Amino acid sequence: ETGVTQTPRHLVMGMTNKKSLKCEQHLGHNAMYWYKQSAKKPLELMFVYNFKEQTENNSVPSRFSPECPNSSHLFLHLHTLQPEDSALYLCASSLPGEGTTEAFFGQGTRLTVV
Amino acid sequence: LAKTTQPVSMDSYEGQEVNITCSHNNIATNDYITWYQQFPSQGPRFIIQGYKTKVTNEVASLFIPADRKSSTLSLPRVSLSDTAVYYCLVGLDTGRRALTFGSGTRLQVQP
């Protein structure tokens, strides 16, 4: 248990559906991240939020829409996805500062687009 | 961000010491070196972090030479449960740009 909770753990959705992934942390961290990990591939950074402000969007298609209402919660809204978007979506949080590079990851949401 | 190079895969047997070396020739003065472990279908887990010389915790040791252009993660007496992918990251978490994961080293421990 890392203190970062993602829901749901598994999600199957059709290409015309709209769904949302949720991430929650109560570690006092102010930076939160979304990563995508496709089968047997490295983690790909999608979005970075620091103090609720989006500081990085790594050329992610607009069918992925992040939302960070406060420093403890992060959402990833999904709509009209493609089968190639099937992957493990990981949320992480950290407390940025000099001398630390430790991010805490959630268990991930295994997404299957059919 | 400094680029890292590490072996794609390694094999070992239970009870052996495993050393995984990572090259990071372009490491910046303020960068820290961090290692993560990832099991299948789980998020990465922080193992150890260092800036220079040697760091040891209950899980692993991290050796960093004086020029800091490489680092070696040492896992003492591995067990089957240490089978995982190990990532070497170099950088500093500023909250404005996340650390980038490379391809990692897939460690397979056999009985």
Image (cartoon, coloured by chain):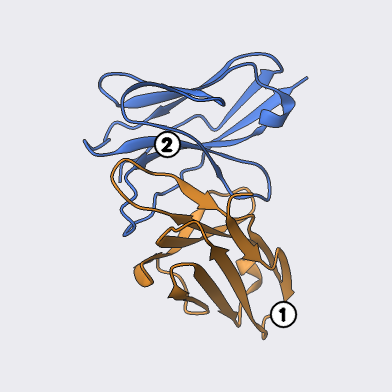
Chain colours: A orange, B blue
Residue B28 placement, left or right of B11: left
Q: CA–CA distance between discs 1 and 2?
A: 38 Å
Which disc number belongs to residue B105? Answer: none
Q: Chain of mark 2?
A: B
> Which percent across, then down, holds residue A37?
58, 56
Percent coordinates x, y for residue A11 in the rendering: 72, 70
Horizontal and vertical percent position of residue A51:
36, 67
Callouts 1 and 2 on one subunit:
no
Residue at 43 percent across and 68 percent down: it is A71
The quarter of the picture where the C terminus of chain B appears is: top right
The reply, left or right, for residue B106 in relation to residue B24 is right
- Name which residue lies at 39% across and 49% down: B99
The subunit letter for the residue under badge 1 reads: A
Amino acid on which disc 1 is placed: Gly
Where does the image place residue B57, in percent across and percent down from the top left? 50, 25
Quarter where residue B4 is shown: top left
Depth check: give the residue in front, B20 or B57: B57
Residue A89: tell me if it is visible.
no
Q: Quadrant of residue B40?
A: top right
Identify the residue position indicated by label 2 in the image. B34
| Type of amino acid under label 2 | Thr
| Mark 1 element type | loop
Q: Secondary structure at mark 2?
A: strand
Residue at 35% over, 40% down = B3
The residue identified by callout 1 is A14
The answer, for residue B7, to whether it is visible in the render is yes
Few, some or many residues within 10 Å of mark 1 (<14, 14–19, 20+): some
Nearer-the-camera pick, B96 or B83:
B96
Image vertical order of residue A59 relative to residue B30, above or below: below
